Image (cartoon, helix red, strand yellow):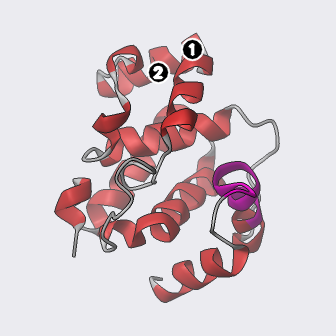
Amino acid sequence: MYRETYGVTDDADLLGTVEDVVRCLGGGYNAERLLWEIATVETGRGTIEDRTIGAGMGICQFDEIGFDDVKARTRSRHRDSINRCFSVDINDVVWEDLRTSPLLSLIWCRLKFKLIPDAIPSSISGRGSYWKKFYNTSAGKGSLAHYLDMNESLA
């Protein structure tokens, strides 16, 4: 297990962090499921070694270009919510901080989807397609089948 690399102790701790982030930034059940499923598909919730130093960072494998984009475009009300909920000023966060902080990785993941006008789907296959389109993108190696397989195998 590589959980210590990502700053994760166990699934219950990670799920609690997912719930805290969604409680702070909104999105309800579909947002919780999406964050949980992304942590599952990207790193097996911390059980898969991160061999892509310099690419995706942290439990959600957030890329640096995306990190910078989200940081620049996050609305002030969401910045204020994060500061109020977690005492985190996102202006002070650097990309490398996501490596060992599940909280920061999940915050960035949620913030990314706050910038997308399309609603988060209610089905796992819908969320998998949403992940592929907006997170993994056409340039990424991931597929809907991989998303579904990872989430089924670690259910």
Q: Secondary structure at mark 1?
A: helix
Q: Residue furthest bottom?
A: 153
At x 27%, y 59%, the residue is 13
Q: Residues within 10 Å of mark 2 (few under 14, many from 20)?
A: some
Q: Nearer the viewer, residue 87 or 53?
A: 53
Mark 1 touching mark 2, by CB under 8 A?
yes
Q: Looking at the picture, how far across and down is residue 81, in whole percent? A: 47, 21
Please say whether residue 34 is one of the residues in the magenta stretch.
Answer: no
Determine whether 141 is above or below 71 in the image.
below
Decide if residue 97 is on the left or right side of residue 40: left
Q: Amino acid at mark 2?
A: Ser
Name the residue tied to disc 1: 77
Determine whether 48 is above or below 4 in the image.
below
Q: Looking at the picture, how far across and down is residue 112, in whole percent? A: 61, 37
The kind of secondary structure the magenta stretch mainly shows is: helix
Name the residue tied to disc 2: 81
